[in-house]
């Protein structure tokens, strides 16, 4: 077993643990509850969840998705979010190596934001405004590293200069604001929330303007595909059709950019220039 395997295993475990905490964040933060107290408990019988019942992925399987005391069902979404976190952290390590932790922060914010958006149709500020601040701070940190001639900062695949970060943020925010404005006019109702506008600002701040374009195009495709599927479902099962939050689709587009962005960009440029 090499160091690479150990880092890989650590990345997955880290992602699953963080996602386990994000499950708590997604439930409690929109309800205005504290994320530390009271400690985790069964929502049905109130039995406290012991540490060995709270191991990501493993415990849910060991308990077969039921409370140890009252056997009330625990939603499979908990284990799915934990697996998602583990796999995305692992993928980030494979793609970004030692820079993965910088991406883990944003992945965690996207997971929290997406599931809060699905549950409550809102994107919290700590994700969107937090993401914008994080993107600018990350570029400033890299820039400082460059000034100090730290070779590590120069070779980072994530490196964008502060001017690109702030420019990308303005571009993402501005473009999404325009889409929202035109959409609201066309549909004569609010086409999307301001949260989506801020979210795109965050993507621009972290990855630059190309990531904004990719996220917008990919999310529009994924969103309309899912929208059509839901409308088809609604015809057979009336009432099943509900408002689709747009945030998770933007996050999917951003993930595609994070893992295959450079390849997509080269393909697109080749398509345009015919080379
Ligand atoms: Zn219980």
Image (cartoon, rainbow, N blue to C red):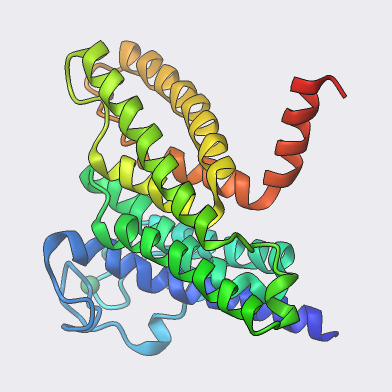
In the rendered image, the quadrant that contains the C terminus is: top right
| Image: 121 above or below 96 | above
Task: Kindly indicate the quadrant of the structure image that contains residue 224.
Answer: top left
In front: 7, or 213? 213
> Could you tell me which residue is drawn at 32 percent across and 41 percent down?
196
Asked if one can make out residue 203 in the rendered structure from this viewpoint, the answer is: no
Looking at the image, in which quadrant does ligand 1 appear? bottom left
| Image: 57 above or below 273 | below
| Residue furthest front in the image | 147
- Residue 120 x, y percent position in the rendering: 21, 46
Task: Report the side of 109 relative to 160 (left or right).
Answer: left
> Could you tell me which residue is drawn at 20 percent across and 66 percent down?
28
Task: Kindly indicate the quadrant of the structure image that contains residue 256.
Answer: top right
- Residue 90 x, y percent position in the rendering: 65, 67
In front: 148, or 130? 148
In front: 203, or 82? 203
> Could you tell me which residue is drawn at 23 percent across and 20 percent down?
184
């Amino acid at each position: 077993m090499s160091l690479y395997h150990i880092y890989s295993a650590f990345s997955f475990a880290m992602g699953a643990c963080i996602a386990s905490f994000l499950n708590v964040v997604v439930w409690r933060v929109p309800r205005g509850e504290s994320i530390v107290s009271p400690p985790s408990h069964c929502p049905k019988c109130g039995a406290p969840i012991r540490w060995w019942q709270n191991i990501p992925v493993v415990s849910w399987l060991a308990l077969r998705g039921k409370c140890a005391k009252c056997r009330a069902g625990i939603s499979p979404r908990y284990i799915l979010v934990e697996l998602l976190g583990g796999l995305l952290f692992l993928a980030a390590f494979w793609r970004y190596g030692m820079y993965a932790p910088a991406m883990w922060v944003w992945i965690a914010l996207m997971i929290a934001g997406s599931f809060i958006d699905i549950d409550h149709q809102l994107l919290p500020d700590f994700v969107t405004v937090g993401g914008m601040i994080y993107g600018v701070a990350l570029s400033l940190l890299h820039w400082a590293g460059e000034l100090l001639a730290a070779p590590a900062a120069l070779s980072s695949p994530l490196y964008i200069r502060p001017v690109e970060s702030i420019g990308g943020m303005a571009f993402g925010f501005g473009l999404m604001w325009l889409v929202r404005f035109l959409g609201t006019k066309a549909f004569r109702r609010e086409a999307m929330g301001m949260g989506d506008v801020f979210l795109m600002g965050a993507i621009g701040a972290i990855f630059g303007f190309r990531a904004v374009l990719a996220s917008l195009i990919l999310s529009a495709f994924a969103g309309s595909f899912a929208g059509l599927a839901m409308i088809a479902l609604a015809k057979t099962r009336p009432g099943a059709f509900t408002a689709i939050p747009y945030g998770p689709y933007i996050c999917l587009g951003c993930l595609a950019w994070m893992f295959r962005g450079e390849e997509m960009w080269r393909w697109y440029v080749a398509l345009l220039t015919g080379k």
